[in-house]
Image (cartoon, rainbow, N blue to C red):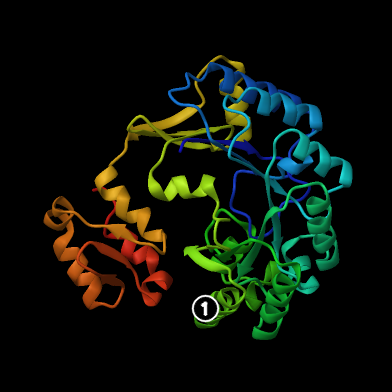
């Protein structure tokens, strides 16, 4: 199953935890960016017909109906089996939702992140829990019932009690899909950089300890399972049949093409990435150059494990895998990070929490 990812990096505000190539960018860049995206789409030689589409960002929910129609119209394969649009809570109107549905959007992913006002405000989020709930109702009324809600585990000020509040809202809203992300600490976000510098801005001093974050994540696994929302990937949980078809292709090494700033692609045995800064992407496209900044052969044998092990179902092991990775399998098993049957390996509960250490063992040299 092949798919398309479109990067729309324009946001209403830059959240403190965000480490994506997105932000509050000049409005006059939007028509230039739309033209660049359309040019990249039209120039692409399609080796397959897309079956899924994913519009991420940024806040693609902020784009105009005409822009969305033009971009979707440049992608072959409609109607796709799944077309997802990421949406910023508090910005969805009945008119917008109806137009999305009419244009072929079948799934919406809401960046709720938390249902506790104090946690939202520390991140820069402006919506309220009730506004997010209203958005869910608006989407459903428009015919978009396949909805994902995001939560972040590890936000400043988060406690066991506040986490239960967010999970209570999930139970109340009854979404078919939930994503639970651990807070990422790196230099690419304001909050991450503040934490690394031992500062206190953005509530950095109030970030839960690593042990507490593990406890909160495992509590989410438990409560979501009780709601019939099972973990199928480290950060993703769904009711049966509502797993993200688009995102599954990343972990199953199925082909996809990304368009726009910092978009990644994997097709025809190659991986490539576009320029990350929006300005650099626009400069390349407007000069008639390729926006790609890196291209290299894929390594399917290794990638099956450092990508596929994210899936709860695990990865099937063959004789060649045993020859190449047998010692690593045994070492990871002995450390309680992998469990194995004759033909399958998958992460243990401990391995999920230390997954980066496991994946490191399978990175191409």
- The answer to whether 275 appears left or right of 342 in the picture is right
**Residue at the farthest bottom position:** 161
Residue beneath label 1, please? Answer: 218
Relative to 181, does residue 167 appear above or below in the rendering? below
- Between 305 and 296, the residue placed more toward the observer is 305
Coordinates of residue 314 in the picture (x, y in percent): 34, 61
- Between 352 and 206, the residue placed more toward the observer is 352
Q: Element under label 1?
A: helix
- The answer to whether 177 appears left or right of 346 in the picture is right
The residue that appears at 59% across and 32% down in the rendered structure is 260
Coordinates of residue 309 in the picture (x, y in percent): 36, 59
Relative to 102, does residue 187 appear above or below in the rendering? below
Which quadrant of the figure contains the N terminus? top left
Coordinates of residue 267 in the picture (x, y in percent): 39, 32
Quadrant assignment, res 305: bottom left
- The answer to whether 241 appears left or right of 25 in the picture is left
Examine the rendering and report whether any part of residue 358 can be seen. Answer: yes
Quadrant assignment, res 55: top right
- Between 212 and 46, the residue placed more toward the observer is 46
């Amino acid at each position: 199953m092949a798919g398309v990812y479109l990067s729309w990096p324009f946001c209403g505000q830059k959240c403190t935890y965000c480490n994506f190539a997105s932000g509050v960018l000049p409005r006059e860049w939007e028509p230039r960016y739309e033209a660049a995206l359309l040019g990249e789409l039209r120039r692409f030689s399609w080796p397959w017909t897309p079956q899924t589409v994913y519009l991420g960002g940024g806040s693609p929910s902020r784009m105009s109906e005409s822009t969305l129609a033009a971009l979707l119209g440049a992608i072959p394969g409609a109607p796709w089996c799944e077309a997802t649009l990421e949406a910023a809570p508090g910005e969805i109107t009945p008119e917008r939702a109806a137009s999305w549905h009419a244009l072929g959007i079948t799934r919406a992913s809401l960046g709720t992140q938390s249902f506790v006002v104090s946690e939202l405000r520390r991140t820069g989020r402006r919506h309220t829990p009730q506004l997010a709930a209203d958005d869910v109702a608006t989407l459903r009324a428009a015919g978009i019932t396949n909805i994902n809600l995001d939560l972040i585990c590890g936000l400043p000020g988060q406690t066991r009690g506040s986490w239960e509040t967010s999970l209570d809202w999930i139970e109340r809203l009854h979404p078919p899909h939930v994503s639970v992300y651990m807070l990422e600490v790196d230099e690419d976000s304001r909050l991450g950089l503040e934490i690394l510098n031992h500062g206190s801005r953005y509530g950095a001093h109030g970030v839960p300890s690593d042990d507490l974050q593990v406890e909160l994540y495992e509590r989410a696994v438990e409560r979501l399972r009780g709601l019939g929302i099972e973990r199928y990937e480290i950060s993703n949980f769904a009711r049966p049949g509502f797993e993200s078809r688009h995102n599954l292709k990343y972990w199953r090494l199925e082909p996809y093409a990304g368009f726009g700033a910092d978009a990644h692609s994997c097709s025809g045995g190659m991986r490539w990435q576009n320029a990350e800064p929006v300005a650099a992407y626009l400069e390349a496209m407007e000069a008639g150059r390729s926006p790609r900044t890196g291209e290299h052969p894929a390594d399917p044998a290794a990638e099956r494990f450092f990508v596929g092990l994210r899936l709860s179902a695990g990865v099937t092991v063959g004789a060649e895998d045993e020859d190449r990775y047998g010692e690593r399998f045994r070492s990871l098993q002995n450390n309680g990070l992998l469990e194995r049957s004759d033909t399958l390996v998958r992460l243990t509960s401990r391995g999920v929490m230390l997954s980066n250490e496991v994946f490191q063992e399978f990175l191409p040299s």
